[in-house]
Each structure stands twice: as C-alpha cells, then as structure tokens.
Image (cartoon, helix red, strand yellow):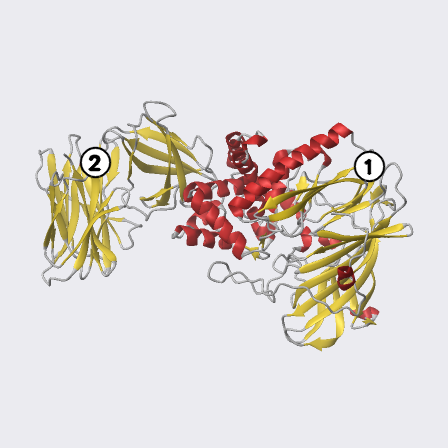
Amino acid sequence: MRRKLYLLTAILSFVQLCFAQERDTKFYYHGNRTANASLAPHIDVSNSTGQSGTGSNIDIKYHKVWWRINPDSIVTVSSVKRGYIKGWVQTNFLTTQNNVSSISFDLNSALTVDSVRYRGAKLPGASIVSSGNVLTLTLGVTLANNVLDSIWIYYKGITPAVNGTAQGYQYTSVAGAGNIINTLSESYEDRDWWPCKADMQDKIDSMDISVNVPWATPTAADTFWVASNGVLIDSAISGSSRTFKFKTRYPIASYLVCVSVAHYQRYYKGVNINGTNVPVVYYLLSGKTAATYTSIVTAMDKINLVLAAFSAKFGDYPFKLEKHGFYDGLVGAGGMEHQTFSAIDPTALTDLRTLAHELMHQWFGDNVTFSTWNDLWLAEGFARYSEVLCGELVPSLGLNPYTIRNSFKTSALGYTANSAWIPNANASTSNLIWSSTYGSTVYQRGCMVVSMLRALAGDTKFFQACTNYQTALAGKSATTDSLKNYFNAVLGADISEFFNDYAGGSGNGAIRGGIGNPINTVNWYSPSAKKLAIKITGQAKSAGSNVTYFNGPVVLHVKGTVPVAMDTTIVVYDWGGGNLSYAGNGLSAPIPGNLLTYNLSATPTSVQYDDSARTLSTGVITNNLIVLATTVVDFSGRKKASGNELSLTLNSTDPITKVELQKSNNGTDFVAAGSMNLLNPGSQTMNYNFTDGTPYTAATFYRAKIYYLGKEELTNIVKIQSAQLKEISVSPNPANKELRVNIDNPAREEFKVRIVNAEGKQIKETTTNSDFIHFDTSDLPAGIYMVQVVQQGQVAQTSKFLVRH
C-alpha cells in the first residue's frame, strides 16, 4: 500500500461449475503451503493463526461469495454516510485437528448474521455466537482431523464507520462519477465487510466472487461496473440488476480481497511476459475530460515496461494467467495492492512511483505475504525500493534513482526510535500501525534494508536470492528469517546479524535490534601506486540505538586523478571485531586484521562515504598516508613446552609506547594477555616476544595492539591450537624472488601450504610432508600476502609477508 476484465455477453459453461447451488461439492485448493523447512521457518497452520485467533482448527481452501452492493443505497448514521452490504460466503475448509465441533471467523459485530447453513440445514440460533469481532459456529457434529467440509454464512448490515487511516468498506462520492463503494482492508478491516479467517499464514487457495449491482440500459454513460480480483468470466443482466462474476485460482490473503462498485470507463491492454500475454486492465472513474483519460492511460501504459523489467529480475509476474491492472477511486491511501488489481487514489493515477510501488507488491506482499503484521516491512520495504528500481531499469520513466533513494535515506535516518520490524505491542490494531511511526519505518527503513542487501550481495546474487524467495514461497507467507535464509543460501554466508541489527526482528518474536544507525570511521591510504587499503577504525551509534555493533555494508566512492573516468565504488562488509569481507559481488570469507587492500586502475586521491545513498549509515573518512600496520614485518607464534610463544617484528620510525598482546578463544572477543617484551631497544627494526603460559584449552587466537603517538594499530590474528598445529615461519620478509616457509613437522604429516593475496584469493598451493618449502615469488606483484597451513581441511596457521621487487 502507498499511503498519503473483460465483459462477456455469453454465459460460459464453466460458470455452471463455479457457481453451482449449495449441493456443489467442488473444492479448489493448492495443497501444502508450508515453506521449505531448510530455508524458511516451519509454519504449522493448525497452531499459527491471525491476530484474532480465529480458525485455529481449520485450513481455508475455497470461498465462493455473493454480494449485493448498491452505492446509491447509503445509510446516514450520526451524520456520516456509510455503506450497506448483503450477501453470503461459502467456505470450504479442511480440519487440522481432531474433535472439531466448532469453527470461528473474523466478522465485525456491526454486521448481522441472518443464518448459517451446514450440511443442508440451518444451524440453530444458539449455535451462532458473535462476540466482539469473532463469529463462532457450533457445528452440531464432531469432525476428525483432515476432513474436507463446507459452510454457508448469510449476512447483511451497515458497515462500521471508517477507523482512522484504515478504511474497511467505504462510501465516497466523486464529481462526475457519482457514488462509489470501495474496500480497503489493510490491516484488520477485512472483517468489517465479510466473514473470513484473517490470517496470512492460511491463505485462501481459490475464490469465486459474484457481485450483484443495479443496472439500467446505459445511455450517455454506463451504470455501475465492478472491480475485483482475478478474471471477469461473466456479467449477466437480469432485469434491473447485473451480476459480475470473477474467479481467481491463486492463493490470496483475506486482506487483499477487494471489491469496488462505481461508474467506470474501461481500458483493455496486454503485455507479453515470457510468451504469456498478460491481460492489463484500467478502470477509471467516469466524468473526466478526454485529455485527462489520455494522460492517465499514457502513464499506466508506461508501467507495462516496468512489469516486464520486474519480471526479468524477480521472476515472471506472479498472476500472469489472470490479469494486472489499476482501478480508480481509492480513499485513505495513495494506492492499495489488491491482488491482480491495485486500487489508486484519483490524485495519484499518473504518479509513476505510486503505480510502480503497487505493482511491486504483486511480488512482495501478494505472491509472498508476510506471516504476521510484525514483518510488514517485507512488503512495504521492497515496494518502496521499487520506486528507485523502476527509474533505474526503465530510464524512459524520467525518474532519478539517486534523488529518490537519497530522500528515502534521509527520511530513514530521522527515525531513530523505531525499527522496520513492528513489535507485538504496536501491531495489534491498524491505528497502532498506520498512525504511529511504524507506519513510516516499514517504508523508509525497510527500503534501506533492501538497498543494503543489494549493495552487499551485488546485483547477480541479490536478484537471484529474491527470485528464489519468490519462486519457492509462491502463494505462501514468510518472515524476516525466511528472507534471510534465502540470502544466506545464495551468499554462502550467515548474515543473521545484519538482519537483526538493521531490520530488528522476525515474526512475532522478541525484538533483536533494528533501532538507530551507525556512524562509521573509515581510514584509507595508498601503500603504493594504484593501491588502496581500507580499515574500519571505529563505530559510533545514534542516540537510543539498541544495537551493540552494526554488522553490514560500508559503501565507499573512490576517486582517482581523473574524475569519473577513474572513479570506482567498493563495498566492504563489516562483521565487527576487526573482521572484514570484500562485498558487492557476493561476500568473501571474513578476513581478520581489519584491513582490506584493492588494486585500482589509478592511484586514489580521495574516498567519500556512501555518496550514492545506498546504506542506512553515515561515516567519517580519514586518510593516513603512513599506517603503522604496513610496517609489521612479521607476527607469528608457536607452541612450546612453557606455553605459546609469540614474536613480533616491526620496522617504524615513529616512537612506540607499548605493544600489548591480546588473546581470544573464538577469534572475536579479545582480552589483554600482557605487554610484549622489546628485545632490542633503540633500533628502527624492533623485535618483541611474549610467552603465554595459560593458553585456552582447544585453541588460542592472538593479536598485537601497537600504541604510538595517539594512534593504535592491530596486527593480523594468529591461531595456535593445542595439538597437531603446524608452526610456521617465513623468510625473507619482505620477499623478492623467493620465500622459504619453515614448518614444525617432526612426524612428517602431510598437509597443504597455500599463498593467498590480500583479497583472499588463492595464488599458489602445494602438498608436502616436509618441514620446509620454497615458493617462487618473482612472478607475484608487490603487496601483502598470507601463507596458510591447511590441516584436515582447516586453516591451522597463517603468517603474513610482503613482496617487494
């Protein structure tokens, strides 16, 4: 939602099947809707229900509905004009528990239930209980588990008054078009006009919708027409009434079911999606000028290009066998993504961003629906981001992606007290959602979460993960964890902390973070021509943040001596604890030591922090042309009888005040082990050592922290295992033409030795059972490398060295 078919004259034989009398036992359903357990949280329909708790013992399979709606029959209550509806709803259901003797539906108590028919007979009045907004029906029989059955509810009434920004069943009047009845059911207003199970985890598998309206022989203008979901299959005229019949065979959430009755001008188009001609329909209110109709249709036609572009990126339009379209007359929002047929406010009919937004919802929100209202950002975040994406994919729209994205980032940074994910206490009513800040964060912060996912994954993996999510969960519902799992699968990495830190939660569980944003300090320098080194040297957070450390992408714009031609954008993924990954085209394995280096086409002259507005963070850039870590000649360790011995060799002209050895049992959380001993004071090349007599039981990780003149630097991390560890040393360091690797291997065990570059790419590898190896380094470009000893498939030891020619 964005806040603020064909007319057939012949009755088809298929209609008789779809609209039979009560004896009809035909069921339409799509089977198990539970997501793949390996990628999405298990959803047990029998135990997972909507906010009201109705229908906990049944699975809705099919609805056949009949409504009589006359926009001219308006009731005035307390000076407010309100709509009237009369109809019946057939529900085919499958029991999901044993001993089912009663079932329940969501229905506002303002509506009157005339009767309920079950198995050919009326239920006694005492078996029909309306309490609050829940209708409970006692069946008079006890059903076993997995039984298909059906029930008919006949009802009528004056629909409730509009409640805040949520509209329900709404009456309005538009000059030139007359009276209109329209529905807007997001979030809890479906119950205000029809009996349903309001539970996104139990979508309706299939529906047949009949709407009976007044009809008179058209003269200068048509009388009433009906907009609804799915395909219009019949519109028979009988006397002064006309019945419009629609069918939809795609699973649909109850809040996405819609009906609108108004005087419409109709336009029929089409767009080809991978060989399927998808009907495209526009219903526009009568009374506009010819020029206005032309302007609206021209704008909506442009969205057909977006439909094709989105299909290429996220998988085919999900409802391509039925229709896509827009209809006029919505009140209460700029647009509403009713499945297959989005409603648009009359003032937004030519707003390309609104139209693209509602179109994207057909994938995110309609095809894959959030399981509970807590995860509403899964729909609104992607739909908001589509306003950026459509301008990028279809330049002829004339939308500037950066301008739009930057406005979203600026807005999102202003929401520092609420997450994109909605906690339970703020999701129980429509007003709590839409009239609170969460009614904005689901859009703005949600959009930036999507933007960051694209930035860190890169286009290929981003769109692949999204397509997998759409394909595997088509017609189902999902949580934030579901989306996370599809990204984890494509990236080959676990980015759970990113979702916790930036989204804030999943489903109706406890809040995990999501409030505030980081202010990162990034240090860059150029160690040699056409080289760039990046360090994340600090992270502050906005006031009130509930996140300990934001794990996520850092986007940097690097400029060279020739602007634009030498510009490049790099993406760093910050895991915290000094672990960084190369990102933007998937994620590399985390690299310890808080240092990434890049080979560029030119020597960098400046670096700017996220000037493309792709992340929900801000940053400070600093430039140290000489960084102490580059003068670390060697930091290594080995296991001895007295403990783990660590050695550090530095080459620095700056006075060093202290070198602290730090240790950890997991490679992330470090504590001080003590000050390292300087062996040769007064020398420019300094040697330090330290013996740790109390290493951790399994393995100990070490790093050295170097203090000098108000600065602090960390070395690479060394891991020493308690057993079977191959101790290594390298020389000379720096190397020129040759590198000698010495390995402590008295048992002559076989293992692999690798050389990897600063990007983590393997350059050389050999297998040996010796205690030394020579590597030819004459063919290696100058730079920083690592030697890795691989034992039993695991990296057992590393040592850093430099190559200089």
Res 632 → quadrant: top left
Residue at the (25%, 57%) spot, across then down = 794
**In-image side of 479 versus 248 (left or right):** left
Res 216 → quadrant: top right
**In-image side of 217 versus 278 (left or right):** right
The label shown at residue 756 is none
Going by the numbered disc 2, the residue's amino acid type is Thr
Judge by depth and name the residue closer to the eye, 116 or 428: 116
**In-image side of 114 versus 194 (left or right):** right
Mark 1 to mark 2: distance in Å?
74 Å
Q: Secondary structure at mark 2?
A: helix
Judge by depth and name the residue closer to the eye, 324 or 753: 324
Q: Residue tagged by mark 1?
A: 177
Q: Is residue 184 visible?
A: yes
Between circles 1 and 2, the one closer to the viewer is 1
Q: Give above or below for 303 relative to 9.
A: above
Judge by depth and name the residue closer to the eye, 484 or 685: 484
- How far from the left and from the top, in percent, is residue 746? 9, 61
Quarter of the image where the C terminus is located = top left
Quarter of the image where the N terminus is located = top right
The 10 Å Cα crowd at callout 2, few under 14, some 14 to 19, many 20 or more, is: some
- How far from the left and from the top, in percent, is residue 316? 56, 49
Residue at the (46%, 46%) spot, across then down = 462
Res 351 → quadrant: top right
Furthest residue in direction top, as rendered: 562
Whether pointer 1 and pointer 2 mark residues with C-beta atoms closer than 8 Å, the reply is no
- The mark that comes first in sequence, 1 or 2, is 1
Going by the numbered disc 1, the residue's amino acid type is Ala
**In-image side of 290 versus 714 (left or right):** right
The 10 Å Cα crowd at callout 1, few under 14, some 14 to 19, many 20 or more, is: some
Q: Residue tagged by mark 2?
A: 630
- How far from the left and from the top, in percent, is residue 585? 39, 43
